[in-house]
Amino acid sequence: MTAVAPGAALYLDTSCLLKLFFREPETRAVAELLATEERVLVSELGRLEAETQLRARLHGGLLSRAQHRRLLAELTRTLTLEPFSLIAFPVDGFERARALTVRTKAHCRTLDMLHMAVMDSVGLTRIFTNDLAQANVARALGFTVTTPL
């Protein structure tokens, strides 16, 4: 993977990505901030999490099959448009996550630490998240955090 110039791109966590597809209090703030960014990176991990959330809403009766199909297609299309770029999960992602976990006393979910590992693997320093535990860990690791709150 190619390293990204520090500060040149913003990593978009799933907690903010989903706000582009579901009307929530933070949706407008997320859309406005993303409109100012030149490059927004979403990992395959984030895409998988978003797809899983869409499936959960389908199986929970919150989406019809037609709505689910439309949102999946919209997610796929969105990730091909500027300023978005989809990045692969690193081969050494689990080892990176373990190493990052040791560097901080702050705690977050395993998936959130895996997002930190993706960022670390490509040299990203900025994250946009709505997850406060993830934001605390990111700050403890020296990342710049933006939240829509």
Image (tube, rainbow, N blue to C red):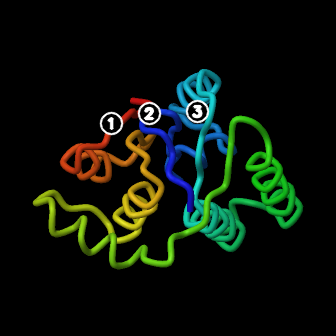
- First in sequence, mark 3 or 1: give its number: 3
Residue for badge 2: 7
Q: Quadrant of residue 21?
A: top right
Position in image of residue 102 (x %, y %): 15, 69
User: Tag 1's secondary structure?
Assistant: strand
Within 10 Å of disc 2 (Cα), the crowding (few <14, some 14-19, many 20+) is: few
Q: Is residue 75 left or right of residue 25?
A: right
Q: Are marks 3 and 1 in contact (CB under 8 Å)?
A: no
Q: Are marks 2 and 1 in contact (CB under 8 Å)?
A: yes
Check the picture and name the quadrant holding the C terminus. top left
Q: Residue at x 20, y 61 (%)?
A: 107
Alpha carbon separation for disc pair 2 and 3: 23 Å
Residue for badge 1: 144
Number of marks? 3
Q: Is residue 79 left or right of residue 118?
A: right
Q: Nearer the viewer, residue 134 or 24?
A: 134
Q: Nearer the viewer, residue 105 or 132?
A: 105
Within 10 Å of disc 3 (Cα), the crowding (few <14, some 14-19, many 20+) is: some
Q: Nearer the viewer, mark 3 or mark 1?
A: 1
Three-letter amino acid code at disc 1? Thr
Q: Residue at x 68, y 70 (%)?
A: 55
User: Tag 2's secondary structure?
Assistant: loop
Q: Is residue 132 left or right of residue 24?
A: left
Within 10 Å of disc 1 (Cα), the crowding (few <14, some 14-19, many 20+) is: some
